[in-house]
Image (cartoon, helix red, strand yellow):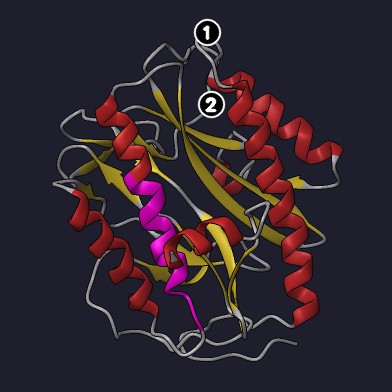
Amino acid sequence: MFRRRKPAIQIKTAEQVELMRKAGLLVGQTLGLLRDAVKPGITTLDLDRLAEAHIRDNGGIPSFKGYHGFTGTICASVNEEIVHGIPRPDKVLGEGDIISIDCGAIVEGWHGDSAITVPVGEITPGLRRLLDVTEASMWHGLAAGVAGARLTDMSHAIEAYVRSQGDYGIVEGYGGHGIGTEMHMDPLIPNHGAPGHGPVLEVGMCFAVEPMVNLGTKDTEELDDGWTVVTTDGRYSAHFEHTFAVTENGPRVLTALDEGSEWFAKLKA
């Protein structure tokens, strides 16, 4: 049984965190496969099929497929699409595009969830910087996920880093979340806000941290497909995500192949 706190944040045992690591590792490996497959001319449905085959061949179940009717194994969001893009056979990637690939897998009843934004061929320096800023902001948020901190300490770390890097739009209304025996659990983790609010982080809590950062304004709209979220000004957006566990020794990034050691060392330096 799980101990519960208010709000209802699931607390995992060390053994359960190890099971989540299995799911997280599978997700991380799948995203590595997809990163290498991204090239001009490939479709988002091609990427989706690669992801599903890899997850199932390695003993996992795609988290997204069938979730509230979603048809894909991945969310494939291109350029001005922020999140929840539906993989399609007619969505062909072109030179200079960027694509957010969000992927989830279930292993032995436990979830892993992660996202990367990948350049398609050569991209502009401005887009490269957008990707770098968004990814680094995620790692600042993850680094704040230590036992004894407050939930919004992660939110503030993300926002503070993005604001320090330029005039970017930080998406509101979408954000990180608790994760464990379900993909989306309490609490929501905004990517902005003051520090020192929300529940105290405890060893055994697991969260997905996922900043979404726009080149233009923060404003968004959902398309008529009921899923795809886009920027209202048509400018491009980047999205990164990792699942991590709060441990006695700091955050353990369950969907990173090295559990975050390289990035955390870089931040300390």
Dot 1: few (<14), some (14–19), or many (≥20) neighbours within 10 Å? few
Quarter of the image that includes the C terminus: bottom left
Q: Range of the magenta residues?
A: 133-146
Which of label 2 and label 1 is nearer to you? 1
Q: Is residue 134 magenta?
A: yes
Name the residue located 40 percent from the left edge and 31 percent from the top edge.
225
User: Cα distance, mark 2 to mark 1?
Assistant: 14 Å
Whichever of callouts 2 and 1 sits on the residue coming sooner in the sequence is 1
Residue 142 on image: x %, y %? 46, 66
Q: Secondary structure at mark 1?
A: loop
Residue positioned 62% across, 22% down in the render = 37
Looking at the picture, which amino acid does disc 1 mark? Gly
- Which secondary structure, mark 2? loop
Q: In the orientation shown, which residue stands out farthest toward the front?
A: 269
Q: Magenta span: helix, strand or loop, mainly? A: helix
Can I make out residue 260 in this image?
no
Q: Give 207 or 119, whichever is nearer the viewer.
A: 119
Q: Residue at 58% across / 37% down in the picture?
A: 74
Of 262 and 224, the residue lying toward us? 262
The reply, left or right, for residue 201 in relation to residue 49 is left
Amino acid marked by disc 2? Pro
Instruction: Assess disc 2: are there few (<14), some (14-19) or many (≥20) residues with their C-alpha within 10 Å of its C-alpha.
Output: many
Q: Would you place residue 159 above or below residue 171 in this image?
A: below
Quarter holding residue 247? bottom right
In this figure, which residue is indicated by the disc labeled 1? 41
Look at mark 2 in the image and give the residue it sits on: 87
